[in-house]
């Protein structure tokens, strides 16, 4: 109950304005303080009596004041004082931190100097092109020069500053700003979104689904399956800040192939019988029922003997119908896969400014239906887009597994060969390896849900400390990740500054541990923001059950009980530069450096595992992709330490644990050096092999590299090579000074399209 009996007083607001005293506002402020302290499955930890106890104590203090006005800061001080005195430590801490964040927020938006700086950043977004303004190029998947792209960047800029000043502890914001760490996708912290998702389409398709604008029925042919798969990716991207992946695309699409075949088989039999004037000779209702019972497109036509035993003509009609049904189904499947690829390179999400970052994993379904999906998806990728362009999305990942597609006697070996052929021309698919030592322990023969799936960017989510009996890829994803500037720590404790003759490894590990503790705390802070969101905040991701058990929540439920299955990921960048800073050589130059590199990343992995056990959450270590971040860290470090040879003298830090791209090394040696790091980086990893020349003309060599990766224990790998296209004649391949397709060499008027995968810094 709010006490209104206080003698009339005035409250002085922060802007100096005097307003009438209103006790209800004090009561509301106190209630919000108590409401901010929640325990899982215990929404009402405190009662109205607790709130009233503090409220009455504050009112009593105000009544005793010998002045007619009180400052708002004084009232808040009284609330803090009473909370602390009466033993509400958790509420006191929460209330105090809230005030600090609000103070920082006011400084950002209202301090004259900082307001000027903030407005300048907005001005750059509105008046400069992406070529002039770094912020407009931050997300390569957003065109910052378009109206909607610019609108997204406005929101992103404001949201980041709001997060740093209002939602994050100052020490985390400072560590990000000074380049000690990089908080990825900081602009999405206020929204509480999670990073990425492995979408189980079979579960989504079971009863149809809703995108919020009408319910979509359960798909009944392969065209609908592929269309709804694209829609699911597009819709879910609006609920997350990262990418969308499908962990077993071939298995999910296969039922659509079978349904299409059944339709085609029934219709073709009917058409041919009708054409032969024999339609009345066969009971088509019974034929349709028999076809509906089929569980494969591999059909022994003799099962229909009862329908044609009296007529050789009818028998031929059944045989011909089966052949035509297979042909039509195969053609329709190709069209469905082609449409899927085209859709994902043209359909937009997030206010129409962004193509979804999509990935598909496939290659292990040995059923005839699954094989038809695999083959036609690869052929559609090989064909390219409308003018022959190489499709960037979805990032396709072919899952390699002995006994399924790796050896000549394996049923899907021909699919593996085709995948190599297509990738040699189009950059994709990449390749993941189920037999890798860190992937194989999860694999259960016959259960594709236990096959490790990857995001195209490298993210991997598999183990689950919160539910060890249900460790699968689908229905889960990464929650957030933050990367550590590893070279910065190495510079301080290494020999590169010529302050010591030998690296101070004790000091290095002590500081690395401190920074990892900082990142862990920052990830937990962000996790709390995510957990305090409601189910209704993510209408597709949760209410449609994309995230496992999301559909079991009530709209107002908080999210801790399901988000705990995701991963909280610590990343790193620039191991090569770190080793150069510490001992003068990187991992490819010296065996001792390689040993030290594995020791450092092993130390980080062990700390992540310790965090998992301590907090019963899935902390993981990711080999951070370097795009954008590589230049940010090195730019700050060069400003502090100057140019250090082999460390800060280039425009980037090397991607994660990779051997530097400038270092001349054999393919087999690079794979040998990088492979052991895959087992340590359970949050995600990738190794690239960089090739010059036309790989499409030597697919055997291409395949041999994939085999080297597999045998070395790499989890996820790709071969990067030039992909050029002449838009005049449509030739695709390596183009030097003269186009092999049409012979032209005047490329200035109509320039070539040159596609490169730039993830391998």
Image (tube, rainbow, N blue to C red):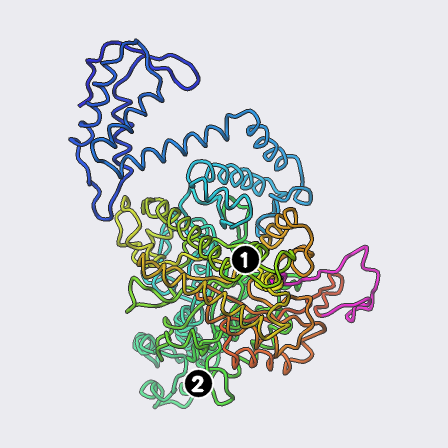
| Nearer to me, 405 or 56 | 56
Quadrant in which residue 586 is drawn: bottom right
Q: What is the x, y in percent for residue 669?
A: 61, 78
| Nearer to me, 655 or 451 | 655
690 sits to left or right of 345: right
Name the element at disc 1.
helix
Q: What is the x, y in percent for residue 132?
A: 68, 42
Q: Residue at x 40, y 87 (%)?
A: 315
Nearest to N terminus: mark 1 or mark 2: 2
The magenta segment? 734-761
Residue 340 visible to an observer of this rendering: no
Q: How many badges with numbers are in the image?
A: 2
146 sits to left or right of 41: right
Residue linked to disc 2:
403
Q: Is residue 748 magenta?
A: yes
The vertical placement of 90 against 270, above or below, is: above
Quadrant where the C terminus lies? bottom right
Are the residues at dot 1 and dot 2 in contact (C-beta closer than 8 Å)? Answer: no
Quadrant where the N terminus lies? top left
Name the element at disc 2.
loop
Mark pair 1, 2: CA separation: 40 Å
Q: Residue at x 39, y 71 (%)?
A: 255
Q: Main secondary structure of the magenta part?
A: loop
Q: What is the x, y in percent for residue 302?
A: 36, 89
Q: What is the x, y in percent for residue 161?
A: 50, 37
Residue linked to disc 1:
486
Quadrant in which residue 341 is drawn: bottom right
| Nearer to me, 620 or 205 | 620
Q: Is residue 25 magenta?
A: no
The vertical placement of 251 against 414, above or below, is: above
């Amino acid at each position: 109950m709010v006490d209104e009996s206080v003698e009339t007083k005035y409250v002085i607001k922060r802007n100096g304005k005097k307003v009438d005293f209103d006790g209800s506002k004090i009561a509301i402020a106190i209630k919000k303080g108590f409401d901010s302290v929640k325990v899982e499955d215990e929404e009402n930890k405190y009662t109205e009596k607790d709130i009233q106890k503090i409220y009455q104590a504050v009112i009593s203090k105000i009544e005793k004041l010998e002045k007619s006005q009180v400052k708002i800061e004084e009232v808040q001080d009284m609330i803090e004082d009473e909370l602390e005195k009466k033993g509400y430590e958790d509420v006191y801490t929460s209330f105090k931190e809230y005030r600090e964040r609000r103070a920082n927020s006011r400084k950002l938006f209202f301090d004259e100097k900082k307001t000027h700086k903030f407005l300048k950043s907005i001005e750059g977004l509105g008046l400069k092109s992406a070529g002039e303004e770094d912020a407009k190029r931050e997300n390569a998947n957003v065109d910052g020069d378009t109206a909607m792209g610019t609108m997204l960047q406005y929101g992103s800029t404001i949201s980041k500053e709001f997060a740093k000043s209002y939602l994050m502890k100052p020490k985390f914001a400072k560590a990000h700003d000074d380049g000690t760490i990089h908080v990825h996708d900081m602009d999405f912290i206020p929204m509480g979104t999670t990073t990425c998702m492995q979408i189980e389409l079979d579960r989504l398709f079971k009863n149809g689904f809703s995108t919020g604008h009408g319910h979509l029925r359960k798909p009944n042919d392969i065209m609908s399956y592929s269309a709804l798969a694209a829609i699911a990716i597009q819709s879910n991207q609006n609920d997350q800040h990262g990418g969308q992946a499908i962990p077993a695309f071939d298995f999910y699409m296969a039922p659509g192939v079978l349904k299409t075949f059944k339709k085609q088989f029934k219709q073709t039999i009917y058409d041919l019988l009708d054409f032969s004037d024999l339609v009345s000779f066969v009971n088509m209702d019974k034929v349709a029922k028999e076809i509906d019972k089929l569980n494969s497109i591999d059909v022994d036509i003799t099962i229909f003997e009862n329908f044609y035993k009296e007529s050789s003509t009818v028998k031929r009609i059944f045989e011909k119908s089966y052949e035509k049904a297979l042909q039509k189904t195969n053609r329709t499947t190709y069209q469905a896969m082609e449409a899927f690829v085209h859709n994902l390179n043209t359909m937009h999400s997030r206010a129409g400014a962004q193509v979804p970052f999509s990935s598909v994993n496939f290659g292990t379904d040995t059923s005839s239906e699954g094989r038809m999906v695999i083959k036609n998806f690869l052929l559609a990728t090989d064909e390219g887009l409308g003018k022959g362009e190489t499709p960037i999305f979805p990032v396709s990942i072919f899952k390699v597994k002995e006994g399924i597609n790796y050896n000549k006697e394996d049923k899907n070996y021909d699919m593996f060969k085709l995948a190599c052929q297509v990738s040699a021309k189009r950059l994709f698919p990449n390749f993941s390896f189920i037999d890798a030592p860190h992937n194989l322990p999860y694999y259960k023969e016959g259960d594709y849900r236990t096959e490790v799936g990857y995001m195209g960017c490298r993210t991997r989510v598999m183990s689950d400390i919160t539910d060890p009996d249900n460790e699968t890829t689908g229905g889960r994803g990464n929650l957030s990740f933050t990367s550590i500037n590893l070279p910065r720590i190495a510079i301080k404790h290494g020999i590169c500054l010529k302050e010591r003759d030998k690296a101070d490894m004790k000091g290095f590990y002590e500081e690395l541990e401190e920074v990892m503790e900082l990142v862990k705390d920052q990830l937990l802070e962000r996790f709390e923001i995510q957990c305090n969101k409601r189910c209704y905040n993510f209408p597709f991701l949760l209410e449609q059950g994309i995230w496992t058990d999301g559909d079991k929540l009530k709209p107002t439920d908080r999210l801790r009980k399901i988000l705990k299955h995701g991963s909280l990921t610590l990343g790193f960048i620039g191991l090569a530069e770190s080793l150069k800073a510490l001992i003068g050589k990187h991992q490819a130059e010296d065996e001792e450096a390689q040993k030290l590199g594995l020791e450092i990343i092993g130390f980080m992995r062990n700390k992540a595992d310790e965090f998992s056990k301590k907090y019963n959450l899935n902390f993981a270590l990711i080999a951070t992709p370097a795009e954008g971040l590589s230049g940010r860290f090195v730019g700050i470090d060069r400003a502090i330490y100057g140019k250090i040879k082999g460390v800060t003298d280039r425009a980037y830090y090397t991607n994660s644990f990779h051997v530097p791209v400038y270092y001349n090394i054999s393919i087999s040696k690079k794979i040998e050096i990088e492979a052991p790091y895959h087992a340590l980086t359970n949050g995600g990893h990738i190794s690239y092999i960089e090739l010059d020349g036309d790989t499409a003309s030597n697919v055997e060599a291409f395949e041999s590299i994939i085999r080297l990766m597999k045998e070395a224990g790499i989890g996820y790998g790709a071969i990067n090579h030039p992909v050029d296209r002449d838009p005049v004649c449509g030739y695709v391949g390596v183009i030097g000074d003269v186009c092999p397709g049409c012979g032209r060499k005047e490329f200035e008027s109509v320039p070539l399209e040159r596609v490169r995968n730039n993830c391998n810094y």
